Amino acid sequence: MAHTERLYYTDCYLKEFSARVVRTSPDPRGTRVYLDRTAFYPESGGQPSDRGTLGGIPVLDVIDEGDEVAHIFPNPPAQESVEGSIDWERRFDHMQQHTGQHILSAAFERTGGYKTVSFHLGTESATIDLDSDRVGAKQIEEAEKLANGVVFENCAVQISFRTAAEVQQLDLRKPTFRESDIRLVEVTGFDLSACGGTHVSATGSVGIICVRKVDRAKGLTRVEFVCGGRALRRARQDYAILSEAGRLLSSGFESVPELIAKQALDLRDAGKSVQKLVEELAQWEATQLWQNAPEKAGVRVVRCVFESTEGKKAKLVAHAVGKQAGAIALIGVKGMPTKLFFSQSTGGRANLADVMKQTLAEFGGKGGGTRDFAQGGGLPEDQLEVALSFAEGLLP
């Protein structure tokens, strides 16, 4: 069986290399190209694949096929011998995040005994899942502090290969059950792990490790973090956002949380005042509509359509009409979707749940309710007036 020599295994800093095309095969995206040797990392272990060029042609993807590495091209190289060039900015970013993950995972295990069960490297941030949903803010802070201490010490990161028998005698952070030779990544004096990914040569190159978000679910804690260049970009974004918030609030960004909290309280109080005014207006409007509605057999039927912006008030009006003696409200609200509110005085002669059901069966939409109050909607806006007239014709 063919075997691809993986140059990144021994030299993660190799940016350019030469190789020979061994064979090609069709792929939905173009062509799969197999080389005798490659510096391109294929997606594996939570780390995305490299990008770059081979023979001047962009590499669309790199796939791990066991003993071989497949390179996806839009079209095959013209020559058997090719020169490869790695997208170094992308590669180094992945090296920073992946080594940072090793350090952070080891820090969580050292400070709280929390083990990492999975790792994912995304385009904006990376995540690790810890084997407990009880990781608190203090544990997060302690692990983050320890991890950055290791970065500041600029410890060597060494790659070595050992037999399976030798590895069984070592204290790996996570056991491995591979039977062939095993690639080990060691953060000197701090962590030893089996790993096939690309890593920096010293922890100082990771840059700062910054936890950005923590989620807890299904017995796990997901920790989102950024390292190095990503941490710098996010810090700049945070600064820009806080500075703009401070400008809008006419204060320094240090005061933003306090001012937002104050405005939230003011907004809540204003909302309560507005709600009270809407209720008073709805009560007054309901009284006017009821007084002006024609009376038939001792019952005044209020029938009207409100604009789409008045949906909350329309419902309050319907309830308020229903509190009047001998009253029925048939109210529609324009919009997408439309709404219907039917209400009557307690113990009225009509069964508004049935009236709503028959109206919606005729004009479309969904809804339901009780004898004295029903609501629905979803019928065509241009049919509201006709629907209300239809509903009135169903009243006893």
Image (cartoon, rainbow, N blue to C red):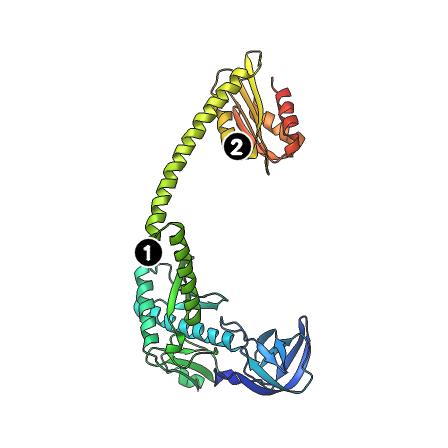
Judged by depth in the image, the label closer to the viewer, 2 or 1, is 1
**How far is disc 2 from disc 1 in space, using C-alphas?**
40 Å
What residue type is disc 1 on?
Answer: Glu
Residue drawn 38% across and 69% down? 209
* Secondary element type, mark 2: helix
Q: Nearer the viewer, residue 57 or 350?
A: 57
Q: Secondary structure at mark 1?
A: helix
- x%, y% of residue 252? 34, 55
Residue 310 image label:
2
Residue 19 rendering spot, x and y as whole percentages: 60, 87
Residue 148 in the image: x percent, y percent? 34, 71
Q: Nearer the viewer, residue 201 or 360?
A: 201
Given the current orientation, which residue lies at the most extreme top position? 297
Characterize the local packing of mark 2: few (<14), some (14-19) or many (20 or more) Cα atoms within 10 angstroms: some
Q: Nearer the viewer, residue 159 or 53?
A: 53
* Residue under pointer 1: 254
Amino acid under label 2?
Answer: Glu
